[in-house]
């Protein structure tokens, strides 16, 4: 993109992009830490990641202030306006991802090392890895203004949803086998759901990238494979 | 007479009926001597709406505006080709009376330019020379209604005999708008009507433009992108004598299709 006549405007937009990138980097680390804390029963790591989330929240507030100031000061039009609005939206999505990772951290503290099944954990680990790569790709697509790369991420969310459904079924069976597993399974279930939600936020970011570049909202129906809300009936039958 | 002062106003009809083109331009070219100032401009201006012309200085937007009431006729070296119609009437037809045309197509300029006469005379002058009013009472009525429609009446009704030049800049501009609408035009051309006004006077004029579009077709040239975005329904972007892009205002300012439009409205033009 060619530069503005007012160079300070370019600096304003660059700063918004830099802050989104910084937030994104922190969120990626938070996801990795959350999954690792869960799989390795690492209570210390869980504590650290819970504390680290405050930085993402603070960055989001700072970004919002800057974006509002940029709108007030520059009255951005067309692509510039979409860039500012997109930075606001993406920051919001990243902040939510951070909260979800923090929530997994809290569940690790609650579980306090009581893990009846490590096989189930591996499913969550795998999902976490997939979501992390989705978030990385979509943030790269955002930084590079690459609509095709963003659409790739958008299409892949289905895979995570499907994994969440299959894990959900496994957990149900496990809980039915022995009620003593319920506490552990519920925490794992919510952790899996959190990871699935992170994937949705990555998809939202992909849609924002599409809007930012194309100037119109994406017209396609979002691919969906998460049917956990209907699953209990089929699992029982 | 009423039909002239209140041109074809069937209240409410303008809300529902699809806007038909009031002004139709086809392949309009303007030359100032050897300089080709406007190149093959074709555009439809919908009836009873506001169209904004934007573009950098020297892009041809004012030149095109002046074609619509044949103001370019007053420049000896200017030559206009192509076709401009208002309600299917070819305004460059040889038999057309230019004075009558300018009564149908009013104009408001960048700098308020009231006549050095009383407020009353500023507004009464046009109707009088066009023979619109037969009696003093009719003329009084036209002056009052024009000042009312220009949103100036309450501020000047007790001092109609005072000089028009004694008013504030914003009031002078509204006086010029009252003067333009007094002869019952159908189209009002505005060439940067707010560029000499403070923000409050500007807001008043913008509010007025929004009201006037119920009854008039308004074409406004402005350098303020925000103003174009606020007051117009359609926007045309000119660059180097070419009409680059024309469309619904919200589209032009959010997702213009031409790169030059985007560069201009986002402040990237060198």
Image (cartoon, coloured by chain):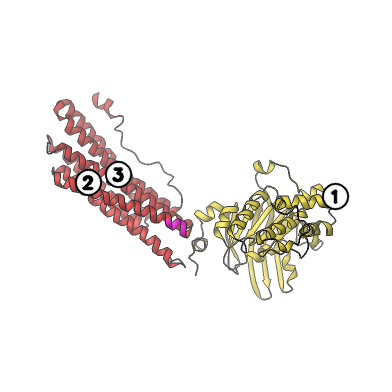
Chain colours: A red, B yellow
> Which quadrant of the figure contains the N terminus of chain A?
bottom left
Mark 3 Cα-neighbour bin, 10 Å: few <14, some 14–19, many ≥20: many
User: Tag count in the figure?
Assistant: 3
Label drawn at residue B137: 1
| Front-most of residues A116 and A114 | A114
From the image, tell me which residue sits under label 2.
Answer: A50
Q: The magenta stretch spans which residues?
A: A69-73
| Residue B121 position within the rendered picture, expressed as x and y whole percent measured from the top left | 80, 59
In which quarter of the view is residue B37 placed?
bottom right
Are the two marked residues, 1 and 3, in contact with CB atoms closer than 8 angstroms? no
| Residue A158 position within the rendered picture, expressed as x and y whole percent measured from the top left | 31, 41
From the image, tell me which residue sits under label 3.
Answer: A199
> Which quadrant of the figure contains the C terminus of chain A?
top left
**Cα–Cα span, label 1 and label 2:** 82 Å
Mark 1 or 3, closer to the camera: 1
| Front-most of residues B113 and A121 | B113
Mark 3 or 2, closer to the camera: 2
Q: Which chain letter goes with mark 3?
A: A
State the predominant SS element of the stretch in magenta.
Answer: helix
Q: Is residue B96 above or below residue B148?
A: below
The structure residue drawn at horizontal position 83% and vertical position 49%, both measured from the top left corner, is B1
Whether labels 1 and 3 share one chain: no
A58 sits to left or right of A37: right
């Amino acid at each position: 993109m060619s530069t503005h006549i007012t160079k300070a405007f370019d600096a304003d937009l660059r700063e918004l992009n830099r802050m989104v990138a910084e937030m994104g980097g922190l969120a990626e680390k938070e996801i990795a830490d959350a999954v690792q804390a869960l799989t390795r029963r690492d209570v210390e790591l869980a504590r650290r990641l819970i504390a680290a989330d405050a930085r993402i929240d603070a960055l989001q507030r700072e970004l919002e202030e800057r974006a509002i100031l940029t709108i007030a000061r520059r009255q951005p039009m067309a692509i510039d306006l979409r860039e500012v609005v997109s930075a606001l939206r993406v920051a919001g999505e990243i902040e939510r991802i951070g909260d979800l990772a923090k929530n997994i951290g809290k569940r690790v503290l609650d579980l306090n090392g009581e893990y009846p099944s490590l096989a189930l954990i591996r499913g969550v680990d795998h999902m976490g890895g997939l979501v992390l790569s989705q978030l990385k790709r979509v943030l790269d697509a955002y930084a590079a203004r690459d609509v095709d790369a963003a659409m790739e991420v958008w299409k892949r969310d289905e895979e995570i949803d499907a994994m969440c459904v299959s894990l959900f079924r496994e957990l149900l069976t496990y809980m039915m086998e022995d009620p003593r597993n319920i506490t552990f399974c519920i925490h794992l279930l919510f952790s899996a759901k959190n990871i699935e939600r992170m994937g949705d936020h990555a998809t939202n970011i992909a849609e924002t990238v599409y809007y930012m570049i194309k100037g119109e909202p994406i017209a396609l129906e979002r691919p969906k494979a998460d049917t956990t809300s209907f699953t209990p009936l089929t699992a029982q039958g | 007479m009423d039909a002239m002062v209140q041109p074809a106003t069937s209240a409410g009809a303008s809300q529902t009926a699809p806007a038909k083109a009031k002004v139709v331009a086809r392949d309009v070219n303007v030359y100032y001597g050897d300089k080709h100032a406007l190149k093959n401009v074709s555009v439809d201006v919908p009836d009873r709406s506001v169209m904004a012309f934007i573009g950098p200085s020297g892009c041809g937007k004012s030149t095109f505006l002046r074609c619509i009431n044949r103001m370019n006729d007053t420049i000896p070296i200017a030559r206009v080709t192509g076709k401009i119609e208002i309600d299917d009437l070819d305004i460059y037809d040889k038999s057309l009376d230019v004075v009558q045309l300018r009564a149908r197509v009013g104009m408001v300029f960048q700098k308020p330019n009231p006549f050095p006469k009383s407020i009353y005379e500023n507004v009464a002058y046009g109707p009088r020379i066009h023979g619109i009013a037969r009696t003093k009472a009719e003329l009084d009525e036209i002056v009052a209604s024009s000042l009312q429609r220009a949103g100036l009446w309450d501020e000047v009704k007790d001092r109609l005999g005072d000089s028009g030049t004694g008013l504030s800049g914003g009031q002078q501009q509204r006086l010029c708008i009252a003067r333009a609408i007094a002869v019952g035009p159908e189209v009002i051309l505005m060439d940067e009507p707010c560029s000499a006004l403070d923000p409050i006077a500007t807001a008043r004029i913008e509010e007025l433009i929004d009201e006037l579009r119920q009854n008039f077709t308004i074409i406004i040239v402005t350098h303020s992108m925000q103003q174009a975005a606020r007051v117009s329904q359609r926007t045309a972007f000119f660059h180097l004598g070419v009409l680059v892009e024309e469309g619904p205002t919200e589209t032009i300012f959010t997702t213009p299709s031409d790169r030059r439009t985007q560069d201009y409205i986002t402040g990237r033009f060198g």
